[in-house]
């Protein structure tokens, strides 16, 4: 049984690689940049998006279906960028730009992780 199969079977998390740790940090950062403004602005969709990021990160750290979560996180993150452009419609903030930069790096990191897993 491989380590990935063992993690899935037992539900326990093995230590994360450096790439995976970086991804988790990026996910937490983007989650917080959604939750806080969502609460302050009274925008439930922002809060829900942030909670989705946090929930995914928590499951990943616990070792629950890591490959599926990594794959699902790519479009989940990618859709946030055009939604931000449309919803903010010219009223962009520095925090918004920083969050989109974090998300772009997150998408690249997730692609590197997923492609690397498929090669193994």
Image (cartoon, rainbow, N blue to C red):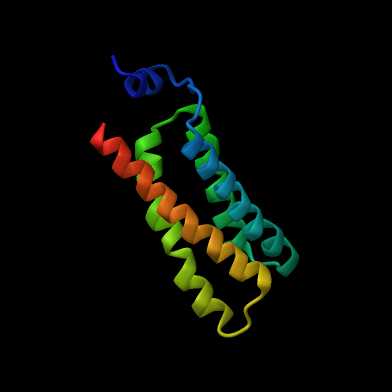
Identify the residue at horizontal 31%, vertical 39% (top origin). 116
The image position of residue 24, as x and y in percent, is 54, 42
Q: Residue furthest right?
A: 40
Q: Quadrant of the N terminus?
A: top left
- 116 relative to 110, above or below: above
- What is the number of callouts on the image? 0
Q: Residue furthest bottom?
A: 90
Snapshot quadrant of residue 99: bottom right
Q: Quadrant of the C terminus?
A: top left
The image position of residue 87, as x and y in percent, is 54, 77
- 37 relative to 18, above or below: below
Snapshot quadrant of residue 69: top left
Q: Is residue 86 left or right of residue 39?
A: left
Q: Is residue 91 left or right of residue 27?
A: right
Q: Is residue 118 left or right of residue 30?
A: left
Q: Residue furthest front?
A: 18
**Of residues 16 and 4, the one drawn nearer to the viewer in this rendering:** 16
Q: Residue furthest top?
A: 1
Identify the residue at horizontal 49%, vertical 29% (top origin). 16
- 64 relative to 5, above or below: below
The image position of residue 7, as x and y in percent, is 40, 21
Identify the residue at horizontal 43%, vertical 30% (top origin). 64
Q: Is residue 93 left or right of residue 3?
A: right
Snapshot quadrant of residue 70: top left
The image position of residue 15, as x and y in percent, is 51, 24
């Amino acid at each position: 049984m491989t380590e990935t199969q063992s993690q899935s079977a037992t539900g326990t998390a093995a230590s994360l690689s450096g790439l995976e740790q970086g991804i988790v940090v990026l996910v937490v950062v983007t989650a917080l940049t959604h939750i806080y403004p969502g609460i302050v602005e009274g925008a439930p969709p922002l809060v829900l998006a942030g909670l989705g990021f946090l929930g995914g990160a928590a499951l990943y750290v616990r070792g629950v279906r890591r490959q599926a979560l990594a794959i699902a996180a790519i479009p989940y993150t990618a859709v946030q960028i055009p939604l931000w452009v449309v919803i903010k419609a010219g009223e962009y903030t520095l925090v918004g730009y920083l969050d989109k930069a974090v998300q772009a790096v997150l998408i690249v990191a997730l692609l590197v992780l997923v492609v690397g897993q498929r090669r193994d």
